[in-house]
């Protein structure tokens, strides 16, 4: 059974087929596979109650991550179940300026209403989507938003500024503008270097355009990640291997790999329905044999991982494979440290955006904005309040399970004393934690590190990290009816 060796770059053996056979509890079908690190449980809060929770939160001076969601795309990928809409043809710049104004206005409402928000210590900033890098079309559609963030928030000197986009967005001129505005990290959605895969999924870029964008990003000397998917129609283990070989030979600093998720996020209240979520479309694709089976899907991931291990890459967070020395402090992006490893507060704006109030408390609050884009626009243009949908209050085992899920996702040590101090939870000796971690240890999915003071995923555990988070932390721990731990 493979485990993470003392040197994270030592070649390791991995057999995902055998791993899944040994862990049938972690075999999750494609159309149920939409594992989300945030919790879908906990007491639901009304928009009004959520606003009261935000008002009472003690976040001044505490580290936080700031997120803006731009719900615009030039095209809609058929697998995408995030909150998005097409940019109106012929009205691109006007639409981008409108959304820039809406996001700034939402931010202003929070800054004016909650005294702690302008005093939170922002260590990382991310513009996502949709296709956030559409804002780089011109200085007029991006600079006011960046200037608003810089002037109104308390940014640390080393704050990480991130923006994500597709190959056509990362031209040399666009990247010069982004660098001039202070962006120092980028995220590029490629998904596949097979043109037939991108054509079938309705991604309107070619492999040649993807490679050009990668070269443009390399020329910035900034860290960036390239997102790649496995489990898509027309992919094979060998085609995935070739794609990853191309990327590592180009010297891409971070490569993220994701399994196709075809569950309906709209039903979960955190996204829009994808084209492939439509039962008639999904059933036709299944009937015609377009989707690979579970075994073939994980053979694709194994092929990708073998390439990255052979070239010295190591996952941090899980699923994010980086070359040594790409980042400091665990070789993990600052955004990922804030969101996942440390589970710092995340302030999130835009339709469908969700964040959380966390800090070092023993209970958390998840914040959820309206996912209906038209309803969000109407609210922001016609009503004075916040465009909130609902919230979730997580305490007891739900809070601990959620924090563990984020910590596990980061692929950084799960420090035992942190959970004892913050929650009064003895992870190795008290239930429901002890039996869950004993099972994970015996199955070789985690290992003890730092002289027994912490737990960390093994390579096997990283391979099935989302399944582990769902089964062990959200289900076994988060939904446990054991007595709530007491300090």
Image (cartoon, rainbow, N blue to C red):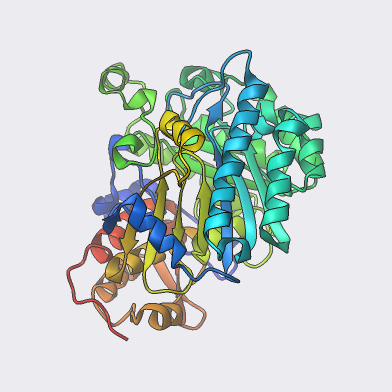
Quick check: can you spot residue 52? yes
- Residue drawn at (40%, 33%), measured in percent from left and top? 372
Horizontal arrangement in the rendering, residue 42 relative to residue 219 (left or right): left
Quick one: which residue is furthest to the left in this view?
481
In this view, the residue in front, 429 or 380, is 380
Answer above or below: position of 97 versus 319: above
Q: Tell me where residue 403 appears, x and y as whole percent.
A: 40, 65
Please name the residue shown 33% across and 35% down the image. 266
Q: Is residue 90 above or below residue 477?
A: above
Q: Quadrant of residue 468?
A: bottom left
Q: Quadrant of residue 250?
A: top right
What is the quadrant of residue 39 in the picture? bottom left
Horizontal relation, residue 210 to residue 295: left or right: right
Which image quadrant: the C terminus? bottom left
Residue visible at 24% across and 73% down in the picture:
432
The x and y percentages for residue 413 are: 50, 71
Foreground pick, 107 / 402: 107
Percent x, y of residue 443: 32, 64
Residue 309 to residue 178: above or below = below
Q: Residue 54, how many percent across, how many down? A: 44, 61
Residue extending furthest toward the bottom: 487
Q: Nearer the viewer, residue 386 or 212?
A: 386
Residue at 69 percent across and 48 percent down: it is 148
Residue 391 in view (yes/no): no
The residue most toward the top is: 90
């Amino acid at each position: 059974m493979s485990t993470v060796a003392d040197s994270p770059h030592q070649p390791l053996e991995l057999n995902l087929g055998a791993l899944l056979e040994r862990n049938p509890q972690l075999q999750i079908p494609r159309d149920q596979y939409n594992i989300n690190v945030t919790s879908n449980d906990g007491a639901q809060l009304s928009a009004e109650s959520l606003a009261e929770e935000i008002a009472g939160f003690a976040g001044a001076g505490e580290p936080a991550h700031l997120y803006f969601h731009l719900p615009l795309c030039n095209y809609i990928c058929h697998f995408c179940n995030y909150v998005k809409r097409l940019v109106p043809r012929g009205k691109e710049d006007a639409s981008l300026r409108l959304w820039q104004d809406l996001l700034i206005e939402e931010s202003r409402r929070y800054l004016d209403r909650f005294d702690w928000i302008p005093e939170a210590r922002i260590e990382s900033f991310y513009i996502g989507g949709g296709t956030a890098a559409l804002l780089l079309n011109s200085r007029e559609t991006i600079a006011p938003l960046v200037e608003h963030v810089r002037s109104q928030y308390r940014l640390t000197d080393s704050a990480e500024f991130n923006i994500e986009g597709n190959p056509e967005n990362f031209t040399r001129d666009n990247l010069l503008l982004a660098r001039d505005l202070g962006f120092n990290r980028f995220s590029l959605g490629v998904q596949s270097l097979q043109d037939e895969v991108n054509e079938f999924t309705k991604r309107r870029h070619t492999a040649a355009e993807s490679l050009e964008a990668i070269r443009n990003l390399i020329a910035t000397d900034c860290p960036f990640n390239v997102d790649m998917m496995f489990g898509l129609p027309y992919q094979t283990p060998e085609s995935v291997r070739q794609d990853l070989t191309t990327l590592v030979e180009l010297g891409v600093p971070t490569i993220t790999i994701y399994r196709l998720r075809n569950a309906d996020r709209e039903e979960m209240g955190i996204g829009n329905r994808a084209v492939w979520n439509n039962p008639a479309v999904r059933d036709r694709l299944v009937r015609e044999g377009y989707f690979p089976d579970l075994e073939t899907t994980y053979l694709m991931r194994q092929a990708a991982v073998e390439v990255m291990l052979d070239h010295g890459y190591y996952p941090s967070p899980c699923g994010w494979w980086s070359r040594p020395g790409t980042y400091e402090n665990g070789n993990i992006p600052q955004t990922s440290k804030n969101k996942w490893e440390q589970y710092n507060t995340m302030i999130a704006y835009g339709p469908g955006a969700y964040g959380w109030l966390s800090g070092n408390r023993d209970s958390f609050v998840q914040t959820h904005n309206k996912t209906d884009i038209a309803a969000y626009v109407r609210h922001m243009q016609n009503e004075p309040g916040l465009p909130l949908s609902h919230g979730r209050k997580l305490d007891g085992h739900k809070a601990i399970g959620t924090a563990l899920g984020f910590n596990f996702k980061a692929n950084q040590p799960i420090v035992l004393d942190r959970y004892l101090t913050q929650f009064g939870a003895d992870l190795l000796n008290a239930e429901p934690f002890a039996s869950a971690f004993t099972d994970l240890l015996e199955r070789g999915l985690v290992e003890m590190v730092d002289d027994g003071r912490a737990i960390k995923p093994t390579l096997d555990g990283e391979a099935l990290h989302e399944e582990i988070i769902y089964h062990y932390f959200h289900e076994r721990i988060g939904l446990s009816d054991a007595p709530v731990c007491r300090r």
